[in-house]
Image (cartoon, rainbow, N blue to C red):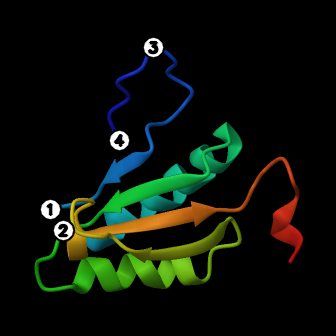
Amino acid sequence: MTNRNNFSDIPENTIYLRRLPIDDALIRLEKYLNQAFVSGLYRIRVVHGKGTGQMKNAVREVLSNHPLVKDFREGYIGEGDAGVTVVQMHDRWKGEQET
């Protein structure tokens, strides 16, 4: 999760989990989702790679049960295809979390 802007407390809209052990990746993902929500990011990208699909399945299992995630989908061509999951976060400012 490299931050390329000058604001160290605002996360990038992409987290890279490729080549990490699944347990470590899921811990990073949980922390990142919380940071993204607090920062008001609406859409984020989770780069998990294609590989065997184990990381993608684990990531999507977390996303499907996460209270800050509104929806998610596989990346389109040009977004990373099956190696990326695009996540729509609940809107922090509208209180959408209570649906």
Q: Is residue 61 left or right of residue 16?
A: right
Q: Which residue does the numbered mark 2 point to in the structure image?
A: 49
Disc 3 + disc 4, Cβ < 8 Å: no
Give coordinates of residue 66: x percent, y percent.
63, 74
Q: Which residue does the numbered mark 1 point to in the structure image?
A: 19
Disc 2 marks which amino acid? Gly
Q: Which residue does the numbered mark 4 point to in the structure image?
A: 1
Q: Quick one: which residue is furthest to the left in this view? A: 51
- Assign a secondary structure to mark 2: loop
- Assign a secondary structure to mark 3: loop
Q: Nearer the viewer, residue 86 or 57?
A: 86
The CA span between labels 2 and 4 is 15 Å
Q: Quadrant of residue 17?
A: bottom left
Of pointers 3 and 4, the one earlier in the residue sequence? 4
Seen at 88% across and 71% down, the residue is: 98
Q: Which residue does the numbered mark 3 point to in the structure image?
A: 6
Of pointers 1 and 4, the one earlier in the residue sequence? 4
Disc 2 + disc 4, Cβ < 8 Å: no
Seen at 56% across and 56% down, the residue is: 33
* Residue 80 visible from this viewpoint: yes
